Image: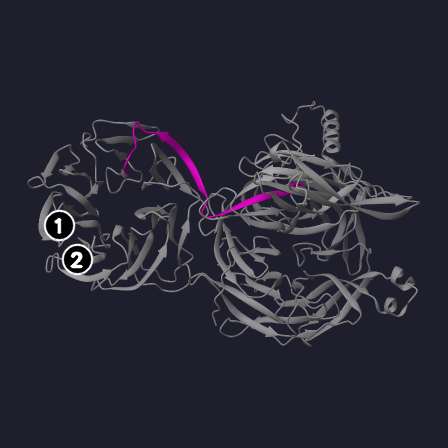
Amino acid sequence: MYLYSLTLQQATGIVCAINGNFSGGKVQEIVVARGKVLDLLRPDDNGKIQTLLSVEIFGAVRSLAQFRLTGAQKDYVVVGSDSGRIVILEYNKEKNVFDKIHQETFGKSGCRRIVPGQYLAIDPKGRAVMIGACEKQKLVYVLNRDTAARLTISSPLEAHKSHTITYSICGVDCGFDNPIFAAIELDYSEADQDATGQAAAEAQKHLTFYELDLGLNHVSRKWSEQVDNGANMLVTVPGGGDGPSGVLVCAENFVIYKNQGHPDVRAVIPRRADLTAERGILIVSAATHRQKSMFFFLLQTEYGDIFKVTLEHENDRVTELKIKYFDTIPVTASMCVLKSGFLFAASEFGNHALYQFQAIGDDPDVEASSATLMEIEEGYQPVFFQPRGLKNLVRIDQVESLMPIMDMKILNLFEEETPQIFALCGRGPRSSVRILRPGLAISEMAVSQLPGVPSAVWTVKKNVNDEFDAYIVVSFANATLVLSIGETVEEVSDSGFLDTTPSLAVSLIGDDSLMQVHPSGIRHIREDGRINEWRTPGKRTIVKVGSNRLQVVIALSGGELIYFEVDTTGQLMEVEKHEMSGDVACLDIAPVPEGRQRSRFLAVGSYDNTIRILSLDPDDCMQILSVQSVSSPPESLLFLEVQASTGGEDGADHPASLFLNAGLQNGVLFRTVVDMVTGQLSDSRSRFLGLRAPKLFSVIVRGRRAMLCLSSRPWLGYIHQGHFLLTPLSYETLEFAASFSSDQCAEGVVAVAGDALRVFTIERLGETFNETAIPLRYTPRKFVLQPKRKLLVIIESDQGAFTAEEREAAKKECFEAAGMGENANGKMEMENGDGDDEEKEDPLSDEQYGYPKAESEKWVSCIRVLDPRTQKTTCLLELQDNEAAFSICTVNFHDKEYGTLLAVGTRKVITVFAQKDFCCRIYSYISICGGWEIS
């Protein structure tokens, strides 16, 4: 069953992520869950993350795990969701789809506390999977293969325990012995019966091992032992000859190695020097890297610090547990270490990132060890460290994420054709205002002023086998300018082109000749420099041209068509003439099919609101094959061929197909399918693009032909994941364009607009919006529009943080203590940076390391007036004395003496006689200086 759904922008936040070889071979891929969407990602050779597949599952993904059967070449994906089912998926590389291998129902749908799906644990040898609920229920499924080597799954085996809350589960690596699963559990049965609360205060977490007896097909509780009440996560330790087996228990301030019959090995997690004593440290995400001779763990704390954990062991006995400071990156929901040397960080808030390993943390650094653990009166001696710049990792790519959106409005502050979306995103130092515009992002490579206003531009290669273009040819009202493409672009006069007349078309003809069509004739420039001229008969002029590499059709004034072909010697020969009933509005010839000498189809647009398909076959040359009437005279025609594909991007087999696109004078793009045998037209569709008649151009995008439509704004029509998409570009109005390829820019577009020549590339295909991010100081709460000046007024507040002035003072002290001087980072910025210059400028960038933590009762807040056009803050009012803003609106009173006022609701924590109280206020602010400041 396929359901129709329309989502403007799919979720960008990632709930969980796993990595493995899902397509087989040695390629490393990442599967991420974005709420109701499963994405398959792969880093390309340049370290950019590409989305191979995106699947809407119409449900909520709660957990993901991957496993591999012994001896298999690829990984399977296990999905825990709100469906009340366990689902096992296999990635089908040929069809580019996730095939559903098994789907077993075990409970009610919905995210319920006793229905499994919240936790998944895999036996490291791929023999069983445990799916657990937050409370009571755990089910174990045995995984095997049948005689045809297909994956089989057993009936569920129960491992339930009533009145028990589960915090984490994982598989224990015990080689090929019976599979064992570990769980952190808390029994609340006594606390439920005790009204005094004493039993609840004394409740104790336990680490429990569950054993699956493969012979008896039964799950039993094998071993249980008390753990710290701050325990929140389990990490599997390699075993079965690769390591000592057991688990790492991540608890508040500690990492503990535990195994049945083994004494605890405990080490403290190093703390930041500026962290207050009341704040503990919890591990929030973990990743394991295994090689044949060694393994280590990367654990990340709730403050973003990553620690490398290693175990010193002799056979099954662990002698020492070491925790070494590795690097600091923004807090993640999941981390994936790829065998190809990448770390994928799915951020909890803000943009996700792909890092490359520069080193694996073997250099000396701050380290805590179980061997140096010292017990003192308050507990254990802490180990302190100071965050530093990235040393072992380097960021090479990032994926935009709007999570979390705190407030959003749709406004047209820039007076563009389409309104913009203004969203408050992020948390703390990663907060920003995002301005979303519909369309693909453009990266502008160069802009050059021309000596006049050009009418057209083309790029041309000298030989069909050349990788890059040789010339850019620009046509003006009475001249043609030829620019040579090399390390620089410069004007040339020896190209053979006629520069005293405007050009109608310039292209490569044959294998190595150039053709220039101008109003008075056709200029054919051979490779050896010989020039052949064809002149128009009488006083008639050429008005329209259509051509491909081997065929040319020109339309003369009055409606006569003349057809030329390139013969075997490379000479351009006149073949046929045809008189049309009236003037020709536009022409195009379909591309020459692979292995053929000519294309069969010529499209002719007429001012009588018709498009005709004519044959170019020698047998029925210039015969009309089909006629299509349209709503307005066509301005531009373009044939777009989609190559045949077996198991294409969308998984299906597609025969080759030919589409005819027409830009009509009423601003509509008309698209129809051309039968590749008969030339008949069918399946016509149309779409309004803008107030100007679309001009259509063929460009190359990711190695494929695509269509650039220039109306009142540019549009790109291209194939993405098996679907044809027509998406606007976030760029100004263009007049004429051509595909561009050079050493510096392999796939670009050269275009003219006004008196400027522009070269640009198109970024991130498949996206609906491109965004501009403006950094903020604290977590944004709400914003309103100041209607007169079209300014945004934003309230921001954070709990447990210091004000900007306090942070700057602390940072200055830190630099001086490190002997770096006051201006070590070049400049002391109040706002967090944009993140791209973190390594270059600020060794302690707030976006990278988070804000220093204050007492939990301390609040910081500010009111900001932002001009979205200039992206500048015109006024910033910091609230004092622990006061935080939470609501805002504009108010108009009857007397109107002060105009529109701003009302801000705040809350202040007051401690009186050790008791907390809240004071709530509403402030009104008057706008002065024409709305640029608030007072």
Q: Pick the residue in front: 258 or 807.
A: 807
- Residue 754 percent across, percent down from the top left: 34, 34
Name the residue that disc number 2 marks.
614
Residue type at mark 1 is Leu
N-terminal-most mark, 1 or 2? 1
Measured from the top left, where is residue 539 in percent x and y? 8, 39
Q: Is residue 718 left or right of residue 492?
A: right
Numbered circle sitting on residue 561: 1
Between 173 and 564, the one lying in front of the other is 564
Q: Residues within 10 Å of mark 2 (few under 14, many from 20)?
A: many
Q: Please state which amino acid type lies under the numbered disc 2.
A: Leu
Mark 1–mark 2 CB contact (< 8 Å): yes
Asked whether the viewer can see residue 364, the reply is: no
Q: Which mark is residue 38?
A: none
Q: Please tell me which residue lies in front, 236 or 551.
A: 551
How many angstroms separate mark 1 from mark 2 (CA)?
11 Å
Return the residue nearer the eye: 672 or 259: 672
Looking at the image, residue 197 lies above or below residue 801 = below
- Span colored in magenta: 428-457
**780 relative position to 440: left or right:** right
